[in-house]
């Protein structure tokens, strides 16, 4: 397994099927004991449409394949109307802890800063301790109280985290 990682912008003609498969693999691994099993069971590679955000997506790849993806842009939440938002960051479980996530997040924050955002937030599952530790290490702080989304497949509880860019 190579540790050489390249971060690049997503392309309009990207292999979005490969990205969807990465999302699926990551969700089933990272959220195994954090989200309702009913929800995880019904997921498939067609659950996501990464091609919709290709302009605001970064890719981490090694010599062999795409190993990580980070999407970002303007806030989708009225609560954070003047903020940038990190929509998602997913790293293939086989390639975690080699710096791909940090590199993707740093580049995404840099892109958001260049687009005039001084504050950036993201949502993280309230019980996803490894992710909260990662974001905290990158400078994010927990803000507000967790929100609860009750779906027909179970309850999802997440927490906002924010970073102020210099």
Image: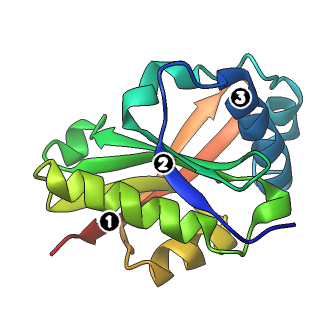
Which residue is the site of mark 1?
162
Quarter location, residue 128? bottom right
- Do residues under tags 1 and 2 come within 8 Å of each other at their CB atoms? no
Mark 1 or mark 2, whichever is nearer to me: 2
Q: Which of marks 1 and 2 is nearer the N terminus?
A: 2
Q: Is residue 57 above or below residue 1?
A: above
- Residue drawn at the location 74% of the way across and 16% of the way down: 46
Which residue is the site of mark 3?
20
Q: Would residue 84 be seen by someone viewing this image from the given angle? A: yes
Mark 3 or mark 2, whichever is nearer to me: 2
- Residue 84: % across, % down: 25, 49
- Do residues under tags 3 and 1 come within 8 Å of each other at their CB atoms? no
Q: Is residue 158 left or right of residue 127?
A: left
Q: Which residue in the rendered view is the most extreme toward the bottom? A: 137
Secondary structure beneath label 2:
strand
Q: Distance between the residues labelled 3 and 1?
A: 27 Å
Q: Earlier in the sequence, mark 3 or mark 1?
A: 3
- Residue drawn at the location 50% of the way across and 67% of the way down: 103
Quarter location, residue 34? bottom right
Q: In this view, does 148 lie to the left or right of 22?
A: left
Q: Is residue 152 above or below residue 77?
A: above
- Residue drawn at the location 86% of the way across and 31% of the way down: 38
Q: In this view, does 32 lie above or below 11?
A: below
- Do residues under tags 3 and 2 come within 8 Å of each other at their CB atoms? no
- As drawn, the label of residue 119 is none
- Residue drawn at the location 61% of the way across and 65% of the way down: 100
Q: Earlier in the sequence, mark 3 or mark 2?
A: 2
Mark 3 or mark 1, whichever is nearer to me: 3
- As drawn, the label of residue 8 is 2
């Amino acid at each position: 397994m190579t540790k050489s990682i390249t971060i690049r912008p997503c392309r309009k003609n990207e292999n979005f099927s490969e990205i969807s498969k990465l999302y699926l693999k990551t969700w089933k691994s990272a959220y195994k004991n954090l989200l309702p099993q009913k929800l995880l069971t019904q997921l498939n590679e067609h659950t996501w449409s990464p091609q919709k955000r290709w302009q605001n997506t970064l890719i981490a790849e090694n010599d062999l394949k795409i190993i990580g993806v980070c999407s970002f842009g303007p806030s989708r939440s009225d609560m954070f109307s003047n903020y940038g938002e990190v929509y998602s960051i997913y790293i293939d479980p086989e390639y975690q802890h080699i710096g791909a996530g940090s590199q993707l997040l740093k580049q995404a924050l840099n892109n958001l800063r260049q687009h005039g955002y001084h504050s950036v937030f993201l949502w993280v599952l309230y019980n996803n301790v490894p992710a909260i530790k990662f974001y905290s290490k990158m400078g994010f702080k927990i803000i507000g109280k967790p929100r609860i989304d009750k779906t027909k497949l179970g309850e999802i509880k997440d927490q906002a985290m924010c970073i102020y860019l210099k």
